[in-house]
Image (cartoon, rainbow, N blue to C red):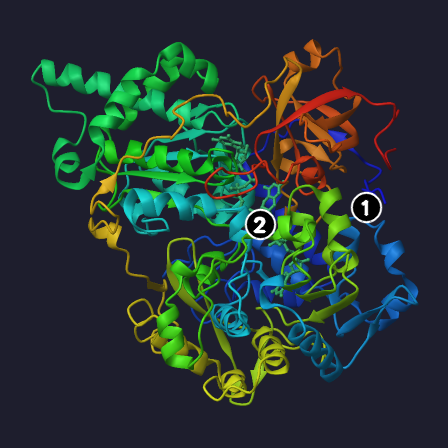
């Protein structure tokens, strides 16, 4: 089995893209996908209800939803996500009659999902090598029987970050009554570094900024997040800030278009005059993994400036009062920065001292600073430490817990943050277990469960026998694709609750089910009438969401209903959980959530549709530090800036690979083959390379290469047939697309503390391919 073939369109083209993010390119792309998914009219009407207090919350990213939304409170990629979910295309039993699973395994991610929405519960029939329709009753009977036969700790309950707070609460409760904390989630591959870093630093696990802070900030530091593709609605507050003259200093190995220039596609004037706003005022092309060194350099420059100011009797640069009153570990941090020398920082960051001093100079003048970041900081061996270094930088000038300032991790899935808030966590310390015991009268499991990487390890060594997936495409999203796919098939039971067909359905256990569910955009009718659900955005605001479209089929069911039936079929009858009552009226689930977390969800039902959402209380916003020291902590990287002791020494021909999202995908969901902003058209089989590396390795732009991981653990990891695209990327780094390149990431190559797979700096060797053209190529 060589993995899915990748498709390409006949009009492949690599050509620099000169337009801004947004603009006419965005408008055209939107019309394309609405037409392709055959929903031009209803689609457009539906979009008007997106991210509105009385409408549905976007199924794409987690960016904040404003209290006063604009008429079109959606972006190109949010609209694509809506179109993709609300497509007119369906795959029912007839589709599975025509295609065996073995055949479908050769299809690309794009081809699988593009065929449309799943409409019937399906069970894998080994004799016919096909998924065949099954009744919901029979499905739950068998799954329940199977689950009853396992040791609870040999079962994994995964959640991708999309399901609502109501569903997630029920799902986590089900897993715990069943007897396990094996509740890994997509956040384990994403912002777990944040969830590990921030509690140690500032005593909260989430960002401290809210949307209003963008209105009064006077400097934005922007690290490793591709806003133009992955959180485009954030371009609006960024554009507003730029119009007020707020500088934006960006650190990113790639010159991402959305971080350079933006035209608001919803502004007729900007569209007609083709005007655009410059986003970044300084752009530092840091080396992948070089941010700790870069930030250390900025801190060093600040210390120097502060000493000068002090010596000359000018106002201090550091916020001495804040440091004194609110922080711990300052002296050690100062000594740490003093110990680093500029030459080493330049090599490690790939940036010049002058550049870092220029960033420090702007920071030294600003009074309200927001630090924004994404996967460019978290998906590294030192991800947690990198996040903490950014917090250190903010603490030096008292930039946490003041209006217009704070730390702003940009979350991924639309409810990934909320799922953790209501109990989806492998770490039982994050869950009020005693409260659950009191409310539901069972003994919750107390031992730590498996996170995503640990679940993969346990699947590899055979201790996990069954996997339940609440959304997502686990096997495709995790590292080490080849090893994981092989091990995956040795499981006894795999069950996926899904909207669309993906590879995690095709690589399956002995007993395998696909349970099709309603999406958030659809009307969810239950005993008490149409239901609302809720989620938490990236700035800790809870929002209600009501479906507006007709269900895709009479056979699909809502996620809460499916979770309740799984629980009822598996658990002994349990008087204190009224699964049916909850499904009949989701407000009762919200009451249960409020009973479990009274401070966080006070008056939850009454406030569900408050414009702008209900903000979760966050101690750090008020300079209350719920850390062991009772202060905000300067945290030093345990190994300083030393080379990673666990990584092999590397030769000159080893290059760090950054795996990226294109502008035409949502995670493993591939909408198409264009990455407009990066000038790639019609293919995903490419490798972005620096021209000096191309020359040094004796290669040429446009040539076809094979890429292999530089690891000596006895496993071969290789991807053949990528086309070199000469690109503005630091020397020693190359870039390509996730999930196709996940085959190259060793499972052990993860954040040392948070275990987030280190998808942003994978050591690889690049060689000329024996293939003359890219696979499937023209
Ligand atoms: N349309 C769309 N929206 C999405 C998603 C999607 O796939 N499509 N995915 C959602 C999810 S789950 C998530 S987590 C987010 C992901 O959104 P992002 O956090 O933007 O994730 P990536 O696309 O992986 O891009 C990471 C960025 O970091 C840069 N980078 C890489 N390495 C480094 C480094 O070492 N240092 C620095 N400073 N920068 C670096 C890359 O060049 C890139 O611009 O978006 C969410 N929103
Ligand atoms: N190399 C590399 N690997 C990465 C990353 C990277 O940057 N580089 N990023 C990581 C990150 S940040 C993340 S978050 C993970 C993503 O990992 P996952 O969350 O597991 O994957 P997705 O691709 O978001 O899942 C897509 C599937 O979700 C299902 N789905 C869509 N909507 C719904 C719904 O409403 N309900 C249900 N039940 N199912 C639904 C559809 O069937 C669809 O096929 O990947 C990680 N993997
Ligand atoms: Mo994510």
Could you tell me which secondary element the residue under label 2 belongs to? Answer: helix
Q: Nearer the viewer, residue 681 or 692?
A: 692
Instruction: Please say if 66 is above or below 358.
Output: below
**Residue 364, visible in the rendered structure:** no
> In which quadrant of the rendered view does residue 777 lie?
top right
Q: Residue 7 location in percent, x, y?
A: 82, 43
Mark 1 or 2, nearer chain start: 1
Count residues near mark 2 (Cα–Cα under 10 Å), then give few for <14, some for 14-19, many for 20+. Answer: some
Q: Residue 279 location in percent, x, y?
A: 43, 33
Q: Residue 671 location in percent, x, y?
A: 70, 50
The residue located at (25%, 54%) in the rendering is: 619
> In which quadrant of the rendered view does residue 688 lie?
top right
Quarter of the image where the C terminus is located = top right
Instruction: Please say if 379 is above or below 446.
Output: above
Q: Nearer the viewer, residue 594 or 275?
A: 594
Quarter of the image where the N terminus is located = top right
Quadrant position of ligand 1: top right
Which disc, if any, is residue 454?
2
């Amino acid at each position: 089995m060589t993995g899915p073939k990748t498709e390409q369109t006949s009009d492949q083209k690599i050509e620099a893209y000169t337009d801004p993010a947004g603009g006419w390119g965005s408008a055209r792309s939107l019309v394309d996908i609405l037409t392709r998914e055959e929903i031009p009219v209803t689609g457009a009407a539906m979009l008007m209800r997106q991210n509105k207090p009385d409408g549905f919350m976007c199924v794409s990213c987690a960016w904040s939803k404003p209290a006063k939304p604009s008429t079109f409170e959606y972006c190109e990629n949010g609209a694509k996500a809506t179109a993709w979910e609300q497509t007119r295309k369906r795959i029912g039993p007839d589709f599975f009659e025509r295609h065996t699973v073995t055949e479908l395994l050769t299809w690309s991610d794009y081809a699988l999902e593009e065929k449309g929405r799943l409409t019937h519960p399906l069970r894998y029939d080994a004799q016919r090598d096909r998924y065949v329709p099954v009744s919901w009753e029979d499905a739950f009977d068998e799954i329940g029987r199977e689950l009853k036969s396992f040791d609870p700790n040999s079962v994994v309950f995964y959640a991708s970050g999309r399901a609502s707070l109501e569903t997630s609460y029920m799902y986590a409760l089900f897993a715990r009554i069943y007897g396990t904390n094996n509740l890994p989630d997509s956040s384990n591959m994403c912002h777990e570094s944040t969830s590990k870093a921030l509690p140690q630093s500032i005593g909260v696990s989430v960002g401290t900024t809210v949307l209003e802070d963008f209105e009064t900030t006077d400097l934005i530091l922007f690290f490793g997040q591709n806003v133009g593709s992955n959180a485009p609605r954030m371009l609006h507050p960024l554009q507003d800030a730029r119009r007020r003259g707020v500088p934006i200093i960006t650190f990113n190995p790639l010159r991402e278009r959305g971080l350079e220039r933006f035209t608001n596609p919803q502004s007729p004037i900007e569209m007609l005059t083709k005007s655009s706003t410059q986003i970044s005022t300084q752009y530092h092309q840091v080396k992948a993994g070089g941010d700790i060194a870069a930030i250390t350099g900025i801190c060093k420059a600040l210390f120097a400036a502060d000493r000068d100011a002090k010596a000359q009797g000018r106002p201090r640069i550091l916020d001495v009062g804040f440091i004194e009153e609110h922080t711990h570990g300052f002296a050690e941090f100062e000594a740490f920065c003093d110990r680093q020398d500029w030459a080493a920082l330049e090599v490690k960051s790939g940036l010049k001292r002058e550049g870092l001093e220029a960033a420090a100079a702007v920071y030294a003048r600003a009074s309200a600073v927001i630090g924004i970041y994404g996967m460019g900081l978290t998906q590294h061996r030192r991800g947690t430490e990198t996040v903490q270094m950014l917090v250190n930088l903010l603490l030096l000038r008292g930039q946490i817990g003041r209006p217009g300032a704070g730390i702003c991790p940009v979350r991924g899935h639309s409810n990934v943050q909320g799922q953790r808030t209501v109990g989806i966590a492998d770490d039982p310390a994050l869950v009020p277990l005693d409260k659950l015991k009191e409310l539901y009268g069972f003994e919750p499991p107390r031992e730590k469960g498996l996170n995503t990487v640990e679940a993969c390890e346990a699947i590899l060594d055979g201790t996990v026998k069954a996997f339940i997936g609440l959304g997502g495409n686990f096997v495709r999203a995790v590292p080490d694709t080849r090893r994981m796919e092989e091990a995956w098939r040795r499981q006894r039971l795999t069950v996926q609750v899904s909207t669309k067909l993906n590879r995690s359905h095709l690589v399956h256990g002995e007993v395998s089910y696909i349970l099709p569910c309603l999406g958030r955009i659809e009307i969810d009718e239950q005993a008490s009438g149409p239901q609302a659900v809720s989620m938490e955005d990236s700035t800790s605001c809870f929002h209600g969401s009501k479906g507006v479209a007709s269900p895709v089929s009479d056979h699909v069911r809502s996620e809460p209903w499916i979770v309740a039936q799984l629980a009822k079929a598996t658990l002994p009858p349990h008087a204190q959980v009224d699964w049916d009552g909850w499904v009949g009226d989701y407000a009762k689930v919200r009451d249960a959530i409020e009973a479990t977390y009274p401070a966080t969800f006070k008056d939850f039902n009454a406030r569900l549709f408050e414009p702008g959402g209900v903000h979760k209380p966050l101690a750090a916003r008020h300079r209350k530090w719920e850390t062991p020291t009772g202060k905000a902590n300067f945290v030093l990287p345990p190994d300083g800036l030393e080379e990673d002791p666990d990584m092999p020494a590397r030769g000159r021909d080893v290059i760090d690979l950054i795996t990226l999202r294109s502008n035409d995908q949502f995670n493993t969901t591939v909408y198409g083959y264009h990455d407009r902003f990066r000038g790639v058209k019609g293919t995903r089989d490419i490798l972005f390379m620096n021209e000096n590396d191309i020359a040094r390795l004796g290669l040429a732009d446009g040539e076809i290469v094979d890429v292999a991981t530089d690891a000596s653990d006895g496993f071969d990891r290789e991807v053949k047939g990528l086309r070199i695209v000469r690109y503005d990327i630091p020397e020693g780094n190359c870039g390509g697309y996730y999930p196709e390149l996940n085959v190259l990431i060793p499972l052990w190559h993860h954040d040392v503390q948070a275990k987030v797979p280190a998808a942003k700096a994978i050591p690889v060797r690049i060689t000329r391919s024996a293939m003359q053209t890219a696979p499937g190529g023209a």
